[in-house]
Structure formats: structure tokens, C-alpha cells
Amino acid sequence: MKVSHRAQSIKPSPTLAVSAKAAELKAAGKDIISLAAGEPDFDTPDFVKQAAIKSIEEGFTKYTAVDGTPGLKKAIQNKFNQENDLAYELDQILVSVGCKHSIYNLMQAVLDPGDEVIIPAPYWVSYPDMVHLTGAEPVILKTGIEDNFKITPQQLKGAINENTRMLILNSPSNPTGSFYSEEELKALGEILVEHPEILIASDDIYEHILWGADRFVNIVNACPELKAQTIVLNGVSKAYSMTGWRIGYAAGPNEIIKAMKKIQSQSTSNPASTAQVAAQAALEGDQSIVREWCGIFKTRHDFVCDELSKIEGVRCRPSEGTFYSFPDMNGVIDRLDSVNNDIELAEFLLEKAEVAVVPGSAFGAPGCIRLSYATSMELLKEALSRMQKALA
């Protein structure tokens, strides 16, 4: 049987692969602590679960409109108005099966072979492969720890050519935890306003897990004139610990949302009806739990960053949000005879320390590793202690 070139051209998710390997070793009796998965360890809030249960009991289990229920779309519209000072009509909003699905829909709707997509590195692992699936080409802009893992206006300007169709901005960033300030976004925006043919995909999924700034801003907040060429992408997975509910959403120009809806109508159709009710409850309910969880992530972050910095050869830049640390491990790799790169380092830590991390190569940043602190402080203390002993 023949497998398509499309399927052969993409790689399995490295984060899922590491998580699967850790689970396999756990099943074999190893005491593995996994710092690989990118999902909060908290349970979905009770009021959200109760809304879903009620919807099932009331028989709300049929198809909905492809682009989402009116109630959820109204809640998203209100969220944009109240939290982001952004106004969208209901036909400018599309609800999808997770933020990842929203991004996939966008790329399928607007990219053609020969188009180029600018992706700052380190990047979320799925961006380049999603681009490849459209026949377009990713253009990677490399950054390092000395740049706070953020691109400069000069880099952006130098990467733009007649084939450039899209720029992806993820802030706060997976995997680095870096956040673009309003001034930095304005500087990038000054270049982008000169290129109205370039779409900006603003991936705001970690919006509410932020402590490195007084308030969240995306590029439309910084440069309102870019609204007509920006798609804002978000979801309930990270902020409300609803990763398995699979609800994401996009907002932007009507013609692009309409094209994304057409793509979705021929793939998944509508997101799960019950999950949409749950997402509406999350957006409309008490938001204090979101702020409480953010404070807990900040405490864990401070601990992890401090402990990593005690290891010889580690350079750990404090994150400004998310629940990841992304230390530069080149100094460690240089002094370990049996380790030559970040992939071998991740294997070394899994074998010697029984701690699972994701190698930075998966994110376009060789020499780094990503640690998720979306787990208990007890497990973080044990994991960092093991890493310190293994790398001593």
C-alpha cells in the first residue's frame, strides 16, 4: 500500500513521542518523572464540568452549526471586547476542535505551494509541519537566549520577499516563555503595515499565563491598523485546564474566517456540542481560578529556574509566562563525554535521572531542552534533584 508524500513529509510530534517513551518506561517499572507534556496538572473547574453534565442530561448531544453555537460565539465575542479591547462580529469568529485545529484551518485556507511562512525559532513543534502540509515553505528566523528568544525588526524585514504570505507570532511562547512587549510589537508592526498582503497569525493560547508584564497585548493591540491582516487564535485548553475538551477559536477578517469554515465543514464539521457548552461556561464564569493558577505556575517557575541555574554549564533565562523553562544546555553538553547534542542529553536524563524532557532540536533550537512545570512542586523538587545529581 502506498503512503502519500504528504504523510511522509511530516514528523511525529516530539513531545508526544517523549511522553509515550516515559509512559512506556513507567509501565516497565521505572520511576519516571515526566516534564515533557504541555498541559496543566489542575482539574477542569467544577462549574465547567457541571455545565457539560447538565447539557448531556438535557439532550444537547446533536450537531451544532459548523462554526460553533451562538452562545459560545457570543461568549468569545464578549471575551475579545472585555479582555482585549477587540471588536469582532459573530461571522468573524470560528470555533474549532482546539487552537491547533484553528491554526491548521487557517493555513489550509490561505496557503498555496510556493508561499512562504515566517516562523521565529524556537517555535511550537507543529508550525513547520502544518506549513509543509499546504505545500508552502517555512522560513525559520533563529533566535537565541541572548536575544531573549525574540526576533528583531531587522530580521523580519530581511526575511520578507514577494512569496511571503504569513508570519506566526506566539507570545507568550511555547517553548521559551518569552513575551513580546507592546513596544517590540509596535516595532514589528511598523514593517508589517507596509505589507498588507502578509497575514499575521497571532497565537495567544498562553495569554492568561503571564507574569512578565502588567497586561497582555498582542500585535493588534499594539498596532490597531494591522487588524485587517491579523487572525487572532486562542482556546480554553491552557487557561482553564481543558486540554482534552478540544475547543479553540479564531477571529479575523470575514473572508478568511469564511474560508476556514469551509475547510472545517469538510473535515471535522462542528466541535463537540458538550465541549462547546463547557467552553462557554469557562469564558462566562468566575475568572479568579485562572489568576490563582497563574500564581502557582509563577512559584514553580521561580523554583525551576533557580535550581537549573545551580547546574554547571546551564544558562536559564527567566520565563515571562507559560509553564515552560527553556535552558541553554550547551555548557553541559560540552563537558559530558557521553553526550554530543541535546537529543543525547534528553536520553541521558531519561536513563540516568529518570526525568523526561524534550530536546530543543524539536523546537528548532539545538542545544536547549524544554521542561514543563505543569506538575506538582513535590515532583519538581524530586526531578530537579535527580537532574542535579546526574549532571554533577
Image: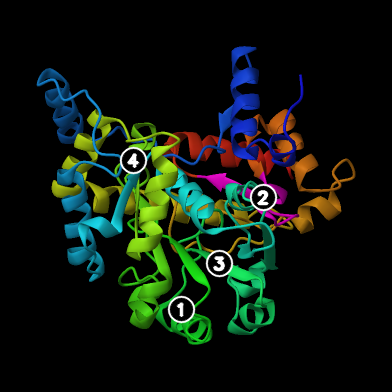
- Tell me the quarter of the picture where residue 378 sits: top left
Tell me if mark 3 has few (under 14), some (14-19) or many (20+) residues whose alpha carbon lies within 10 angstroms of its own. Answer: many
Specify which label sits upstream in the sequence, 3 or 2: 2
Specify which label sits upstream in the sequence, 2 or 4: 2
Q: In the image, what residue type sits under mark 1?
A: Leu
Spatial CA span between label 1 and label 3: 16 Å
Q: In the image, what residue type sits under mark 4?
A: Ile
Q: Which residue is mark 4?
A: 247
Specify which label sits upstream in the sequence, 2 or 1: 2
Task: Please provide the residue range marked out in magenta.
Answer: 359-372
Which is in the foreground here, disc 1 or disc 3? 3
Q: Which residue is mark 2?
A: 132
Q: In the figure, 213 relative to 209: above or below? A: below
Q: In the image, what residue type sits under mark 3?
A: Met
Q: On residue 166, which mark appears?
A: 3
Task: Pick out the residue farthest to the right.
Answer: 337
Q: On residue 185, which mark appears?
A: 1
Which is in the foreground here, disc 2 or disc 1? 2
- Tell me the quarter of the picture where residue 254 sits: bottom left
Kindly indicate whether the residue at mark 2 contacts the one at mark 3 (C-beta within 8 angstroms). no
